[in-house]
Amino acid sequence: MELFSRDEEYNYLPYDGCVHYYGRVVDSLVYYQELLDQIEWKNDEAFIFGKRIITKRKVAWYGDESYAYTYSKVTKQALLWTPALVALKNIAEEKCRNQFNSCLLNLYHSGEEGMAWHSDGEKELVKHGVIASMSIGADRKFSFKHKDTKEVISIVLQSGSLLTMKDQTQDHWLHRLPPTKKVIMPRINLTFRQMHS
């Protein structure tokens, strides 16, 4: 099966950051069911205005070691890589020529589950490092919004595709996965990251 990729040098952001979309880099059918079955999925939780919220969306956190990662005032301890995650990490590292030591996974059961506007600026992450986002399952729209100009840029992330965010992207842009009733299939998102060791 022929896998295709986009121009790796094209920056989807017009200024203040760098986003590359590589198109399809893996055969998602090879990994979809294995990730659903073997990842230790848990409902995500967050504290918003002092109230504990449990999401329908499920998450998992893996890495080279048991890194602690805190976001939305909740701390997670990384589990050690599974063979499938190592294989996908190797593909991401080869495509974007960077090393990753951790991966945050999200499981969206349908298009009605999404992610609100946010940026990944937690202190545990290497500042201005590369975050490589791999999509397995349903195609979904992914959007960026500039924090000052409010300009919005959207990309449809195909199953098996890879997108990277780097440099000053998290400083100046928010991103989100908008919910939609048009998508009924699940999507697994793997975000390979660089944590301070």
Image (cartoon, rainbow, N blue to C red):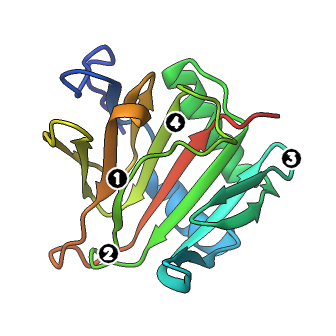
Q: Amino acid at mark 2?
A: Met
Numbered badge on residue 131: 4
Marks 3 and 2 sit apart, C-alpha to C-alpha, by: 32 Å
Instruction: Tell me if mark 4 has few (under 14), some (14-19) or many (20+) residues whose alpha carbon lies within 10 angstroms of its own.
Output: many
Residue at left offset 48%, top offset 78%: 49
Of 46 and 105, the residue lying toward us: 46
- Estimate the x, y position of residue 28 in percent, counting from the top left: 44, 53
Q: Nearer the viewer, mark 1 or mark 3?
A: 3
> Which residue is identified by label 3?
65
**Is disc 1 in contact with disc 2, using a CB cutoff of under 8 Å?**
no
Marks 1 and 2 sit apart, C-alpha to C-alpha, by: 11 Å
Residue 58 versus residue 101 in the image, above or below: below
First along the sequence among labels 4 and 1: 4
Quadrant of the image occupied by residue 136: bottom left
Residue 5 versus residue 76 in the image, above or below: above
First along the sequence among labels 1 and 2: 1
Instruction: Tell me if mark 1 has few (under 14), some (14-19) or many (20+) residues whose alpha carbon lies within 10 angstroms of its own.
Output: many
- Residue furthest to the right in view is 65
Q: Amino acid at mark 1?
A: Ser
- Estimate the x, y position of residue 7 in percent, counting from the top left: 26, 18
> Which residue is identified by label 1?
159
Q: Amino acid at mark 3?
A: Glu
- Estimate the x, y position of residue 145 in percent, counting from the top left: 23, 44
First along the sequence among labels 4 and 2: 4
